[in-house]
Amino acid sequence: MTQDELKTLVGQAALQYVQPGSIIGVGTGSTVNKFIDALASMRGSIAGAVSSSVASTQRLQALGIKVFEAAEVDELAVYIDGADEIDHAGCMIKGGGAALTREKIVAAQSRQFVCIADDSKLVETLGHFPVPVEVIPMATRRITRQFGALGGLAVVRMKDGMPLVTDNGQHIVDVTGLKIADPPGFESEVNQWPGVVTVGVFAFQKAQVCLLGGPGGVKTMRF
């Protein structure tokens, strides 16, 4: 199966975690787009969704699914989102789509995080994929040096020849060269650096379930 077909498979499999009448959390990215497309078949039986990005909000609304602001909802039954990497404990690297801050907010608002991914995203140790970090622009240079002291290389993410601007009006630095053996410790440390909005390591808002698509179908991992 192609990677696109695997994304479709796990997107459809995630529907089993959607409770009728509920408001659900919806993430961002190409795999989540497959879930949103599948969710259209249930639009009449759910109350709506809270979205982690402008792009996902637009896709949900185009399919007739009501989108709530996070501040309108106390708690979400489930959050469905992808991952750039996930380890065997359910910790993830996220933010390839530049929505990591809002993804972490919606994940924290949800009783259960269900990760949907293809099996290429499962790793023994996080860090093969560049770690995205959303930063306040004035702090970028210093934060880049701090990652250098840890042995990493931090580069500002660009779009159309200019630094990419997130939905929150901030920049992203992508950090390579790190092996993250202690995801909670790493997340805690980087989150304390002045100017960091969010680091794309999800250890405190990790997945409880991962639907992993592979040649044999969808494998369910629980953490």
Image (tube, rainbow, N blue to C red):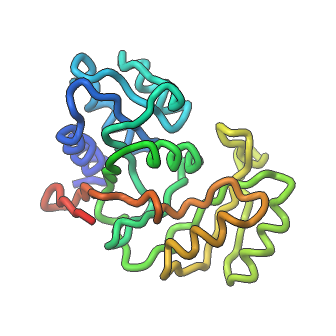
Q: Quadrant of the N terminus?
A: bottom left
- Residue 138 sits in quarter: bottom right
The image shows residue 114 at horizontal and vertical percentages of: 31, 50
Of 154 and 191, nearer the camera is: 191
Q: In the rendered view, tell whether residue 99 sits above or below residue 19.
A: below
Q: In the rendered view, tell whether residue 176 sits above or below residue 102.
A: below
Viewed as shown, does residue 7 lie left or right of 107? left
Residue drawn at point x = 36 percent, y = 15 percent = 64
Furthest residue toward front: 74
Q: Please tell me how many numbered marks the rendered image carries.
A: 0
The image shows residue 177 at horizontal and vertical percentages of: 61, 79
The image shows residue 44 at horizontal and vertical percentages of: 24, 16
Of 51 and 192, nearer the camera is: 192
Q: In the rendered view, tell whether residue 103 sits above or below residue 87.
A: above
Furthest residue toward left: 216
The image shows residue 148 at horizontal and vertical percentages of: 74, 79
Residue drawn at point x = 35 percent, y = 50 percent = 113
Residue drawn at point x = 50 percent, y = 38 percent = 52
Q: In the rendered view, tell whether residue 59 sits above or below residue 107.
A: above
Residue drawn at point x = 44 percent, y = 47 percent = 107
Q: Quadrant of the C terminus?
A: bottom left
Of 31 and 187, nearer the camera is: 187
